[in-house]
Each structure stands twice: as structure tokens, then as C-alpha cells.
């Protein structure tokens, strides 16, 4: 379980960065469309 948790945490960190960038890009796109 300990090993799996470490792998999961590492994946979550990378996924979190991807999700953050995705949301940022989405917000940016919608702002451009609104103008």
C-alpha cells in the first residue's frame, strides 16, 4: 500500500498541474470569446 500511495501521489501532482493548465487555458479562451 505504501508504494502504491507514493506512485498515486506522484501521478496526482502531475495531473494537478495538467488540470490547472487546462482550466487556465479554458478561462483564457472564454475571456477572449466574450470580448
Image: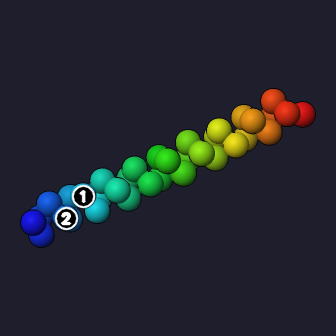
The structure residue drawn at horizontal position 14% and vertical position 60%, both measured from the top left corner, is 4
Q: Residues within 10 Å of mark 2 (few under 14, many from 20)?
A: few
Residue 26 located left or right of residue 32: left
Decide: is 24 above or below 8: above
Q: Please, what secondary structure does the residue beneath circle 1 have?
A: helix
Q: Mark 1 = which residue?
A: 8
Outermost residue on the right side: it is 35
The answer to the question of whether label 2 and label 1 lie on touching residues, with beta carbons closer than 8 A, is: yes
Q: Residue furthest top?
A: 33
Image quadrant in which you'd find residue 1: bottom left
The residue where tag 2 is placed is 5
Name the spot of residue 16 as percent of width and height, x first: 44, 54
Spot occupied by residue 34 in the image (x, y as percentages of width and height): 85, 33
Q: Residue furthest bottom?
A: 2
Percent x, y for residue 20? Answer: 54, 51
Q: Secondary structure at mark 2?
A: helix
List x then y, in percent, for residue 25: 64, 40
Above/below status of 31 relative to 7: above
Q: Residue at x 72, y 34 (%)?
A: 29
Q: Residue 27's image quarter?
A: top right
Q: Kindly identify which numbered label has been placed on residue 23.
A: none
**Separation of marks 2 and 1 at Cα, in angstroms:** 5 Å
Number of numbered discs: 2
Counting other residues with Cα less than 10 Å from the Cα at mark 1, is it few (<14), some (14-19), or many (20 or more)?
few
Quadrant containing the C terminus in the rendered view: top right
Is 5 on the left-hand or right-hand side of 19? left
Check the image and tell me how it is coloured: rainbow
Amino acid at each position: 500500500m505504501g508504494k502504491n500511495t507514493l506512485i498515486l501521489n506522484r501521478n496526482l501532482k502531475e495531473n494537478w498541474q495538467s488540470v490547472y493548465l487546462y482550466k487556465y487555458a479554458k478561462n483564457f479562451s472564454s475571456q477572449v470569446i466574450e470580448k
